[in-house]
Image: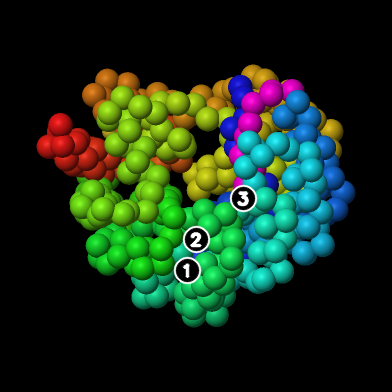
């Protein structure tokens, strides 16, 4: 396996408490046993292993700083990490920070400019939509602080290089066109709409039954705004589905049948699977073998039988998916959404009905254009 994405959990805690969060509020408790943030020593090991990985696989990969909230990492350690990555990796290995935006300040932005690091901010829509789920530990909303962070980012003279986009977790009860217009008003370069995590044991928030299509209808309405807009932001999931329907390829996991090499490094240096698997059951993102950046080469981990088995989880095994005419586009969705406590991942996505509706809707529009 080649690695495409290395997610570095530089902080295992967060300064806000989103009610849908798969890290803290879906049953996994591993974060409690992790150091609160990466140490200088582990940061040195991470830099050394990523330099070695690039030499070993001679293929670029994306490095994403993640959390918790990555900006909780003390600034001197963050600076050592970003400078180290900038020195040892070529520009083709992108470096980015996925943040909730509340801790963005001018010093951080200067550090990002100096080290060629970009920022993506999580924000779910206008204040009332965002503050329904993205709340502080006292229960209050966090919109004002996230919006202030985005404003600071947009005002920076190098905003065109620094600000790559936003990540929005869909609330199907919100007005999709209003949410689309909100992102337009922020002039964001891109929006990555994500469905809420869930499975057959615990349906995603906002989804009434397995057969209901709240999320599919919501995103289909966004698609209608998107195709009518002469100057739209990039919307990754819609671009991917449209490209796949036209015979192209996706750029990220979650649709299509391309297998991506995704690895996570935790705050103690442990190497784990895609952390979204945490939402299935406690410890679902852990390998049986305990690997660490302090002792193990990432290219050797990626070549191991256990890692290859984990990567193959991206391919759905359910006979319903295998026989589905939409398999090449849908790809069975994210593995975590196929989970059932009795049958494991051997099921279609809990979002199957939503995907069928959404893909059918996009297909109709594309046929009209032909
Ligand atoms: S999840 Fe549903 S739409 Fe997607 S491939 Fe499986 S059966 Fe088809």
How packed mark 2 is, by other alpha carbons closer than 10 Å (few <14, some 14-19, many 20 or more), is: many
Mark 3 or 1: the one toward you: 3
Q: Position of residue 43 (x, y in %)?
A: 81, 48
- The residues bearing labels 2 and 3 have C-alpha atoms spaced at a distance of 13 Å
Query: Which structural element holds mark 3?
Result: strand
Q: Which residue is mark 3?
A: 96
Q: Position of residue 226 (x, y in %)?
A: 26, 52
Left or right, 9 with reference to 349: right
Left or right, 117 with reference to 46: left
Q: Position of residue 150 (x, y in %)?
A: 52, 68
- Toward the viewer: 76 or 153? 153
- The residues bearing labels 2 and 1 have C-alpha atoms spaced at a distance of 9 Å
Query: Which structural element holds mark 2?
Result: strand
Asked if residue 339 shows in the view, the reply is no
In this view, the residue farthest toward the left is: 368
Q: Name the residue rendered at 41%, 33% in the picture.
A: 250
Quadrant location of ligand 1?
A: top left
Asked if residue 236 shows in the view, the reply is yes
Q: Which residue is mark 2?
A: 122
Query: Which structural element holds mark 1?
Result: loop
- The residues bearing labels 3 and 1 have C-alpha atoms spaced at a distance of 22 Å
Query: Relative to 336, is 56 above or below?
Result: above
- Toward the viewer: 260 or 37? 260
Q: Are marks 2 and 1 in contact (CB under 8 Å)?
A: yes
Point out the tag, 2 or 3, that comes first from the N-terminus: 3
Q: Which residue is mark 1?
A: 134
Q: Is residue 268 magenta?
A: no
Q: Position of residue 117 (x, y in %)?
A: 65, 52
Quadrant where the N terminus is found in the figure: top right
Quadrant where the C terminus is found in the figure: top left
Q: Which residues are magenta?
A: 56-65
Point out the tag, 3 or 1, that comes first from the N-terminus: 3
């Amino acid at each position: 396996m080649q690695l495409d994405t290395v997610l570095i959990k530089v902080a295992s805690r967060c300064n806000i408490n989103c009610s849908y969060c798969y890290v803290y509020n879906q049953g996994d408790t591993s974060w409690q046993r992790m150091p609160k943030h990466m140490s200088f020593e582990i940061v040195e090991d991470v830099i050394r292993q990523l330099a070695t990985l690039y030499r070993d696989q001679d293929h670029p990969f994306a490095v994403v700083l993640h959390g918790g909230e990555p900006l909780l990492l003390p600034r001197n350690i963050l600076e050592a990490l970003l400078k180290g990555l900038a020195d040892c990796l070529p520009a083709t290995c992108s470096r980015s920070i996925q943040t909730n935006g509340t801790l963005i300040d001018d010093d951080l932005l200067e550090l990002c400019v100096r080290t060629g690091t970009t920022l993506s901010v999580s924000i779910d829509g206008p204040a009332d939509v965002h503050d329904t789920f993205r709340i502080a530990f006292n229960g209050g909303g966090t919109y004002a602080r996230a919006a202030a962070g985005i404003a600071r980012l947009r005002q920076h003279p190098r905003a065109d290089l620094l600000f790559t986009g936003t990540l929005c977790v869909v609330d199907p009860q919100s007005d999709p066109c209003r949410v689309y217009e909100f992102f337009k008003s922020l002039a964001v370069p891109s929006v990555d709409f994500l469905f809420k995590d869930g499975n057959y044991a615990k349906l995603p928030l906002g989804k009434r039954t397995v057969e209901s299509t709240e999320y599919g209808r919501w995103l289909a309405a966004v698609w209608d705004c998107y195709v009518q807009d002469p100057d739209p932001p990039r919307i990754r999931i819609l671009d991917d589905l449209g490209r796949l329907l036209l015979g192209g390829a996706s750029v990220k996991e979650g649709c299509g049948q391309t297998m991506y090499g995704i690895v996570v490094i935790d705050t103690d240096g442990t190497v784990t699977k895609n952390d979204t698997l945490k939402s299935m059951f406690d410890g679902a993102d852990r390998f049986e073998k305990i690997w660490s950046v302090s002792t193990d080469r990432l290219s050797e981990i990626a070549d191991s039988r256990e890692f290859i088995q984990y990567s193959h989880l991206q391919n759905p095994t359910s006979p319903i998916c295998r026989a589905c005419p939409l398999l090449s586009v849908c790809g069975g969705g994210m593995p975590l959404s196929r989970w059932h406590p009795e049958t494991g991942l051997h099921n279609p996505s809990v979002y199957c009905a939503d995907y069928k509706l959404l893909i059918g809707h996009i297909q109709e529009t594309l046929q009209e254009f032909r």
